[in-house]
Amino acid sequence: MSSKKLYFRGIKDGFPICLGYLSVSFAFGIYAVGAGLSVWQTILVSVANVTSAGQLAGVPIIVGSLPLIEMVLTQFVINLRYSLMSVSLSQKLSPRVKLLHRLAIAFGVTDEIFAVSISQKGDVETSYMMGLITTPFWGWTIGTALGALAGDILPEMVVSALGIALYAMFVAIVIPPSKKNHSVAFCCLLAIALSCAFRYLPVLKDVSAGIAIIICALVSGLLFAWIAPIPDEEKKDGPNDSASDEGKAVAT
Amino acid sequence: MIRTDVFFLYLVVMAGVTYLIRMLPLVLCRKKIENRFIRSFLYYIPYAVLSAMTIPAIFYSTGCLLSAALGLFVAVLLSLFEKKLLTVAIGACATVFVVEYLMNLLG
């Protein structure tokens, strides 16, 4: 496929993410202006970071002018999951992807863009990734601007309803592969059980949310890699391999 | 309102840390990993991360527990039928809206 075609396929695959981001970043825009940032500051935070949880945690640190080290630690812990995704994605990128292009693609590693890119068959190329990042990036930016500008106009109930959008998208990414591959389903259930433990159990609930998620993911991922390893590379396109069509529904 | 130069200082630190976390692994791991255990681990990780991020946080993402629980139920149902990302997101939002609207009506 020509790189132009790949780019447009990326744009198209990024469209559902873009619409999902519109609502989530809209909610962020409302929140950040309410917390005390100006409209253009709110937009700049979204443009420079493109990460929901990190931005939500970062705004009060900026507004309260808390120590910079707190910003470093919070962003590090909350966003550390991206480094796990980047390691995964490094395996999925075609060996032809140049260093400069890797530097650009790194900017767009988000939960959803990552999920869609790894659900592609075979290696992914630079032009596809650029397209896949472009649409969600604009959704994220425009949604933030709209929320920052129009936040007060919307009734509270609409804002409350938008709050669930991001999580619903995560559900839609996780469930289809769990249906096809029961090891994925059990791995997710374990991660959920651990995550609930970190929320409700004494001592464990004092662990920060960012670190808790990393521990949940590491424990579940390591355990299932050990007890239910995926089939070997050679058989990757074989008919019995559930790993090769993971999350196919996401991309279509 | 926060001073502009202070704002930019925080913004640069925030964006810099976030970018480095994403960039370093992508640039440093350029060879295909052959090890089956590590490949399996990287296969499971995204699903484990997303599951842990969603539950129980989703229950506190709306105005009340009931609307969130029903929103989650609708999202799971639509996902089981392998509906598109957007459809699932809109379905869940609409459910939350309707439930909270009805609860408001009933006081």
Image (cartoon, coloured by chain):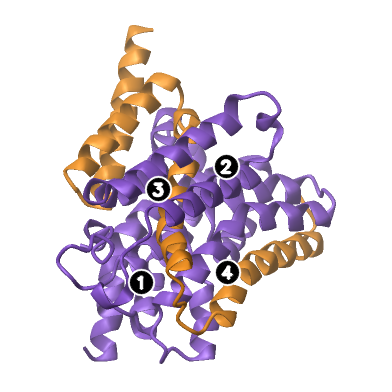
Residue that numbered label 3 is attached to: A23
- Residue lying at the far front in this picture: please name it: A227
Colour orange, chain:
B
Tell me the kind of residue under disc 2. Tyr
Dot 3: within a 10 Å radius of its alpha carbon, few (fewer than 14), some, or many (20 or more) residues?
A: many
On the image, the x and y values in percent for residue B54 come to 45, 40
Residue at mark 2 shares a chain with residue at mark 4: no
Q: Which quadrant of the figure contains the C terminus of chain A?
A: bottom left
First in sequence: mark 2 vs mark 3? 3
Dot 2: within a 10 Å radius of its alpha carbon, few (fewer than 14), some, or many (20 or more) residues?
A: many
Q: Which mark's residue is nearer the viewer, 2 or 4?
A: 4
Q: Quadrant of residue A155?
A: top left
On the image, the x and y values in percent for residue A73 come to 75, 54
Chain containing the residue with disc 4: B
Residue A148: assigned label: none
Q: Which mark's residue is nearer the viewer, 4 or 3?
A: 4
Residue that numbered label 2 is attached to: A31
User: Is residue A163 visible in the rendered structure shown here?
Assistant: no
Q: Residue shown at 52%/70% (left/top)?
A: A87
Q: Which mark's residue is nearer the viewer, 1 or 2?
A: 1
Measure the alpha-carbon separation of dots 2 and 4: 25 Å
Residue that numbered label 4 is attached to: B22
First in sequence: mark 1 vs mark 3? 3
Tell me the kind of residue under disc 1. Leu
On the image, the x and y values in percent for residue B56 come to 48, 32
Measure the alpha-carbon separation of dots 2 and 3: 13 Å
